[in-house]
Image (tube, rainbow, N blue to C red):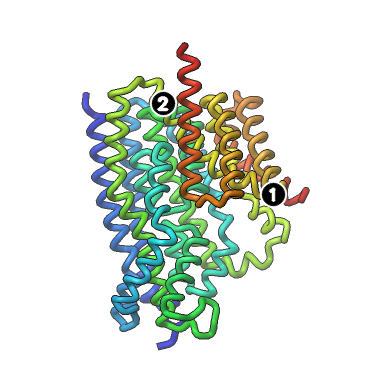
Amino acid sequence: MNSGADYNDKVIRLGIITTVAGLVANFIPAGYLAMIGVSPSLEDIVRILIVAATAFGVGWIVQPLSFYSLLGAGGSYIAWLCGNVADIRAPAATMAQKAADAEPGTKEGEIMTTIGIASSVFVSVTIITLFTFVGAHIVPILPKFVTKAFGYILPAVFGAVYVELAGKNLKVGLGTIILAVIISWGSKVVGIPGWLVTILIILAGIVVARIVYTLEKR
Amino acid sequence: MDLKTVMNSPAMWIASSIMIIVVIIQSILFFRMAVIEANHIGLERRRWLAGMRAAMVTAVGPSLSPVVILIALIAVLGAPTTWMRMNDIGAARTELAMSALAVKVYGVDMRSAAFDLKAFAYAVWGMAINNAGWMMVTLFLTHRMSNAEKTLSEKSDAAWVKLLMVGAMLGLFGFLWSGQLISGMDKVFAGAAAAVTMLAISHLFKSYPRLQELALGIAMLVGMFATAALF
């Protein structure tokens, strides 16, 4: 039975084809504007590229790498095309595994992240499309209490996802969040850039896992 | 040609819809492939359906949260561009920041009277170039990561690889959460309230699988609204 290898190959093939399609689609509005005669000069396009790479280039590389262990290959291809990775895709993947009782790092776990992330796309596209058309009418009549609550969605999502993940190994969970807070706070004081903080804290998580592994093995 | 007519024109809607179509088709194809494989390895329909429902419920809240910035983006960039960019890679804040940076290259400001059709073209190019960065990296790195993962699990102790993955995930979400934990008592409270709710649902109500599917949705609502009420 080499269905494992087969499935992986199929995921990668589909991922490459759909990502290339996404890259083409990504430039169609810019192409249309150029067609009707409105476009930056080639020189300015290069300038924009430099500005973008300076501001976000590290994120282009660090983010797909850091989320890989959570998303898997299939989940990565979907998530880095449709976005909202930390606040929608990763929580959906975690919950899909939890509800299906599938463990991360297993074949079942990987299938469930793909199913969960794809399902979350159907929901988010529907909601965002709806709000593109009617949002201007609804948002002004929302109670202030509700718009204020929206401001707390990120800490709430991250806190809930964290304890869910920490359930896989309480010791690693506890150790990592303590180190994470110390590193985040220290970096803010010293002024270390965000992408480096991401790497440092992920490494801290791996080191804590290694320590727990070594201690439990003895 | 005038900015307002071009940025909300039918042609602009069509040009922007291609990305949405690609996003939806991609998810349908991956969904189908994963379900076929689930049946193949004996992951029961009951279980993957439960996972699917849980993921869909979880996605509702975070999809609603950018509505306020969405309205602001429509005012500056028009509805078609906003619709496309909110459904593809790049968070709302990133798209706004990148547009502003690109428009600066042209030499005007985003919300000024000088923001004309040409400035709009600069913003559209800016977002396209920036989003292409993530897609290119995904294109070149994902299969390499997949191979590296395979090699790692073949060569090392399986128990360690599993724990390594858990450590990396906890590190990632530890990074995301700790950034919130150091930025004010209200955010500490929101995260703690959601975390406690999540724990309570997972442990006290273990025997209600349907409730487990809603766990994150409920935890999120408790965290958000309790904080809005108390702070």
Q: Nearer the viewer, mark 1 or mark 2?
A: 1
State the image coordinates of residue A184 (x, y, percent, origin top left).
Answer: 58, 44
Q: Which numbered disc, 1 or 2, marks the residue that appears first in the sequence? A: 2
Which of the 4 image quadrants contains residue B197? top right
- Element on which disc 1 rests: loop
Q: Residue at x 64, y 36 (%)?
A: B195
Which x, y percent locates residue A185? 61, 44
Q: Is residue B187 left or right of residue A106?
A: right
- State how far apart marks 1 and 2 are (Cα): 34 Å
- The chain carrying label 2 is B
User: Does the CB distance between marks 1 and 2 fall below 8 Å?
Assistant: no
Q: Which residue carries the number 1 mark?
A: B184
| Front one among B48 and A88 | A88
Residue lying farthest front?
A190
The residue that appears at 63% across and 40% down in the rendered structure is B218
- Residue A14 x, y percent position in the rendering: 26, 46
Instruction: Please identify the residue farthest to the bottom as the structure is shown.
Output: B1
Label 1: chain letter:
B
Tell me: residue B87, above or below residue A140.
Answer: above
Looking at the rendered image, the quarter that the N terminus of chain A falls into is: top left
Amino acid bearing label 2: Lys
Q: Is residue A120 above or below residue A169?
A: below
Asked if B95 appears above or below B161 in the picture, the reply is: below
Point 59% across, 46% down: residue? B179
Three-letter code, disc 1: Gly
Q: Is residue A157 visible?
A: no
| Mark linked to residue B162 | 2
